C-alpha cells in the first residue's frame, strides 16, 4: 500500500542576479518543497530578503484589519487579477478607503447619538406641565418630528457605506492575495543558501515533474541557473503527498490531525476509510439521525467550500450512510421501533429488527469485542510489516508477532469453552510461545503490557455503550412526549412537538460529536499505538 | 438473605456507574483545563486536546458495562 507520490531531492544553483526571476518562476510552478537552510558558516549563509518587506507587511496588516471590520462573508471570493491591475498607488488607495469608511461610520454614530437623545426626551413625556418655556417646547417638538427624517438619512448613509464596502472589499481581497504572495517571494531567500555571488536551493519535487522544471529553467536561463537530482537515503524526511482515489481523500484529514506517516511506514488511510464510518454507524445507528446528518452535510457542503470543511463533511457523509445501514439493522427511526410501527415482522426471512439495542445488548457487546480484536490484530499486522521493512524479520516476530500469537491463543482458548476439539492445546502452546517471545523481545516489562492490551480490547465496548446511551436518550424523549405530554391535549400538543424536535436535535448534536470523537479515539489510541510512528512532513510546495 | 443479596447486586450496579462517572468527570476536568491552556498557547493543538480530553471516558464505559452485566446477567440467575 504505497500510495504516495514519489519524490526526488534536488539542488538548484544559480547566480544571484537571476535569483528574483527564479523565485518568480518557482512561485508560479508551485512544485518545489524547499528545505530551510539552517547551518550557516563563513562561506555559506542565509540569503537576505528582497526589497522592503516591512512596508509591504504593514500595508498587508492594515488591509487585513479593514477586511476583518467588513466581515461580510466574502472570504471565499477568489481574487482574480493581473499584476498590472494592482495599482502602484496601492498604499494611497487603501488609506483612502479606510478614511471613507471611517467618515461614514462616524456620521452614522453621530446620528445614532442624536436619535438616542430624542428618544430620551420623548420618554419624559409631556413637557408643558413642568414649567418650561413655550419657545423651547416648540423647538423640542420640531426636533422630535424630524426623527423619521433622521432615520431615513441614516439608512441612506448605511446603504451607501455597504455599497462601498462591497465594491472595495473585492479590490482589497485582491490586494491581500497579491501582497501575501509578494511577501512570500521577497522572504524566500531567507530559506536559501547563499554565497557572495550565487544562491542554492535545496528541496523536494515530485519525480515526474523533474524534466519539466529542468527544461523550463534551461529555456529561460540557459545554464546560468541549473537544477540537479541529489542522492538521498530513505531515512531522510521525504515530504509526503498522498495520491488516494477521491472517495478516500477526506480521511487524510484524520491523519493530518494526528501526524503524517513517515516515508517507509504503511499509510493507514484506506483502513481508516473502512473502519471509521463503520464504528460511527455502530455507535449512532439510527435511520432518522443518519438521514438528517446526510442531508445536513450535503447542504453544508454548498455553504462551506474550504478544503478542511469539505473533508470533515465528506467523512460525515460516509459515516451517515453507515448510520442508516445500522439503523435498519437496529430498526430505529428517531428512537421509535420502525418495524414494529410499520407492522413488518420479517424481511427475506430475517426477523426484524435484527438486533434490538436495548434488549440484545449482550450480542452487540460481544460483536464490539470481536470488532475490537479484529481491529487490534489489523494494527499489529501493520506493525509487523513496518518492523519488517524498517528493521528485520526477527525484530518483527519478537515485538509484533508475539502479540498477534497472544491474541490468537486467547481466541482459541475462548473457542475451547464452547466447542470440543484440539483448540485447548493449540491455544495453550500458542500462549506459552508468545509469552516466551515477548520476554525475549521486550523483557519482563512486556508482560505488564498484557493488561494494556486487555484494556484496549475492552475499550471497544464503547461501540455498544455510546450507542446504548444515545438510543436511551431518544427513547426517553419519545416516551415523555407520547405518554406524558400528548395525552393532555390542547396546547400541550404544540409543546410536545417542541420538546420532540428540540430533544432530538440536541441528541443528534451529541451523537455526531460523541460518535465522531470516540471513533477517532479508537483509531488514535487503540489502533495507531500498535504500529504508527508518525512524524512525517507534509509536502507543501513553495507558492501555495 | 436472598433479598439482601439481590439488593447488594442492584446497589453495586448503581455504584459502579456513579463512581466511574465521577472518576471520568474528575479526570476529564483536569485534562480539559490543561488542554484549554495548551490551545490558548498554540491553536493547532485543538484536535489533539479534544481527543486527549475524551480518553478517560473509557472508565465510565467500563462502569456501565459492569453494571449492565450485573443487572442483566448476574441478577436473573439470582431471581
Image (spheres, grey):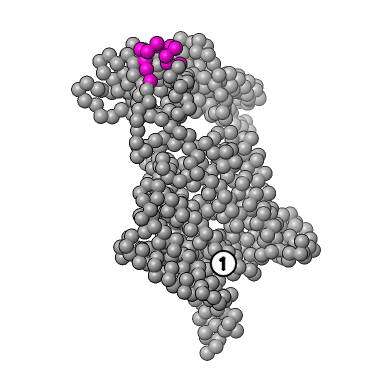
Q: Secondary structure at mark 1?
A: helix
- Residue A145 position, x and y percent, is 65, 24
Q: Residue at x 69, y 64 (%)?
A: A354
Q: Nearer the viewer, residue A383 or A513?
A: A383
Q: Chain of mark 1?
A: A
Task: Spot the residue most to the bottom.
Answer: B1
Residue range of the region highlighted in magenta in the rendering:
A216-227
Q: Residue at x 47, y 74 (%)?
A: A425
- Residue A343 position, x and y percent, is 79, 63
Q: Nearer the viewer, residue A518 or A406?
A: A406
Q: Which residue is mark 1?
A: A366
B37 shown above or below A62: below
- Residue A246 position, x and y percent, is 58, 38
A94 shown above or below A378: above
For label 1, the crowd category at 10 Å Cα-Cα, with few meaning under 14, some 14 to 19 and many 20 or more, is some
- The answer to if B35 sits in the magenta stretch is no
- The answer to if A221 sits in the magenta stretch is yes
**Is residue A230 at least partly visible in the picture?**
yes
Q: Is residue A494 left or right of residue B62?
A: right
Task: Spot the residue most to the left.
Answer: A42
Q: How many marks?
A: 1
Q: Nearer the viewer, residue A215 or A518?
A: A215
**Is residue A114 at least partly visible in the picture?**
no
Task: Spot the residue most to the right.
Answer: A343
- Residue A44 position, x and y percent, is 24, 22
Amino acid at each position: 500500500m504505497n500510495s504516495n507520490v514519489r519524490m526526488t531531492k534536488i539542488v538548484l544553483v544559480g547566480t544571484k542576479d537571476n535569483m528574483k526571476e527564479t523565485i518568480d518562476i518557482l512561485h508560479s510552478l508551485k512544485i518545489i518543497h524547499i528545505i530551510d537552510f539552517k547551518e550557516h558558516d563563513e562561506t555559506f549563509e542565509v540569503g537576505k530578503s528582497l526589497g522592503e518587506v516591512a512596508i509591504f507587511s504593514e500595508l498587508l496588516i492594515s488591509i487585513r484589519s479593514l477586511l476583518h471590520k467588513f466581515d461580510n462573508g466574502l472570504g471565499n471570493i477568489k481574487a482574480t487579477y493581473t499584476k498590472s491591475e494592482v495599482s502602484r498607488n496601492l498604499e494611497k488607495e487603501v488609506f483612502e478607503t479606510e478614511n471613507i469608511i471611517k467618515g461614514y461610520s462616524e456620521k452614522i454614530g453621530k446620528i445614532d447619538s442624536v436619535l438616542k437623545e430624542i428618544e430620551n426626551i420623548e420618554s419624559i413625556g409631556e413637557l408643558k406641565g413642568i414649567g418650561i418655556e413655550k419657545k423651547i417646547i416648540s423647538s423640542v417638538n420640531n426636533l422630535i418630528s424630524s426623527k423619521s427624517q433622521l432615520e431615513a438619512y441614516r439608512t441612506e448613509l448605511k446603504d451607501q457605506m455597504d455599497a462601498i464596502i462591497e465594491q472595495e472589499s473585492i479590490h482589497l481581497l485582491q490586494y491581500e492575495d497579491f501582497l501575501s504572495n509578494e511577501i512570500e517571494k521577497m522572504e524566500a531567500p531567507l530559506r536559501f543558501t547563499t554565497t557572495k555571488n550565487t544562491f542554492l536551493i535545496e528541496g523536494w519535487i515530485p519525480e515526474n515533474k523533474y524534466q519539466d522544471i529542468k527544461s523550463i529553467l534551461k529555456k529561460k536561463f540557459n545554464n546560468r541557473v541549473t537544477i540537479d537530482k541529489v542522492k538521498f537515503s530513505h531515512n531522510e524526511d521525504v515530504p509526503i503527498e498522498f495520491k488516494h482515489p477521491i472517495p478516500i481523500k477526506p480521511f487524510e484529514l484524520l491523519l493530518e490531525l494526528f501526524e503524517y506517516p513517515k516515508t517507509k511506514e504503511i499509510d493507514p488511510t484506506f483502513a481508516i476509510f473502512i473502519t471509521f464510518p463503520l464504528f460511527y454507524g455502530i455507535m449512532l445507528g439510527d435511520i432518522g439521525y443518519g438521514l438528517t446528518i446526510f442531508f445536513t452535510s450535503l447542504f453544508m457542503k454548498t455553504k462551506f467550500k474550504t478544503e478542511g470543511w469539505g473533508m470533515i463533511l465528506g467523512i460525515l457523509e460516509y459515516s451517515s450512510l453507515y448510520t442508516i445501514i445500522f439503523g435498519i439493522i437496529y430498526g430505529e427511526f428517531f428512537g421509535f421501533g420502525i418495524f414494529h410501527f410499520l407492522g413488518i415482522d420479517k424481511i427475506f426471512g430475517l426477523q426484524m429488527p435484527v438486533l434490538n439495542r436495548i434488549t440484545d445488548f449482550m450480542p452487540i457487546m460481544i460483536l464490539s469485542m470481536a470488532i475490537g480484536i479484529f481491529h487490534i490484530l489489523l494494527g499489529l499486522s501493520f506493525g509487523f510489516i513496518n518492523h519488517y521493512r524498517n528493521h528485520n524479520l526477527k525484530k518483527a516476530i519478537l515485538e509484533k508477532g508475539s502479540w498477534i500469537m497472544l491474541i490468537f491463543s486467547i481466541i482459541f482458548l475462548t473457542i475451547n469453552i464452547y466447542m470440543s476439539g484440539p483448540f485447548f492445546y493449540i491455544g495453550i502452546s500458542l500462549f506459552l510461545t508468545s509469552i516466551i517471545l515477548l520476554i525475549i523481545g521486550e523483557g519482563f516489562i512486556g508482560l505488564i503490557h498484557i493488561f494494556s492490551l486487555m484494556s484496549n480490547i475492552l475499550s471497544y465496548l464503547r461501540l455498544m455503550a455510546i450507542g446504548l446511551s444515545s438510543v436511551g436518550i431518544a427513547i426517553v424523549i419519545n416516551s415523555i412526549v407520547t405518554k406524558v405530554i400528548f395525552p393532555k391535549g390542547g396546547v400541550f400538543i404544540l409543546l410536545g412537538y417542541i420538546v420532540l424536535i428540540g430533544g432530538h436535535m440536541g441528541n443528534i448534536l451529541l451523537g455526531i460529536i460523541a460518535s465522531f470523537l470516540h471513533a477517532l479515539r479508537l483509531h488514535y489510541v487503540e489502533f495507531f499505538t500498535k504500529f504508527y510512528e508518525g512524524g512525517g512532513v507534509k509536502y507543501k510546495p513553495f507558492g501555495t | 438473605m436472598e433479598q439482601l443479596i439481590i439488593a447488594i447486586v442492584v446497589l453495586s450496579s448503581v455504584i459502579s456507574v456513579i463512581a466511574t462517572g465521577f472518576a471520568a468527570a474528575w479526570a476529564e476536568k483536569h485534562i480539559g483545563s490543561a488542554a484549554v491552556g495548551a490551545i490558548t498557547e498554540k491553536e493547532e493543538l485543538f484536535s489533539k486536546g479534544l481527543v486527549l480530553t475524551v480518553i478517560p471516558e473509557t472508565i465510565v464505559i467500563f462502569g456501565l458495562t459492569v453494571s449492565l452485566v450485573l443487572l442483566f446477567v448476574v441478577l436473573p440467575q439470582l431471581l
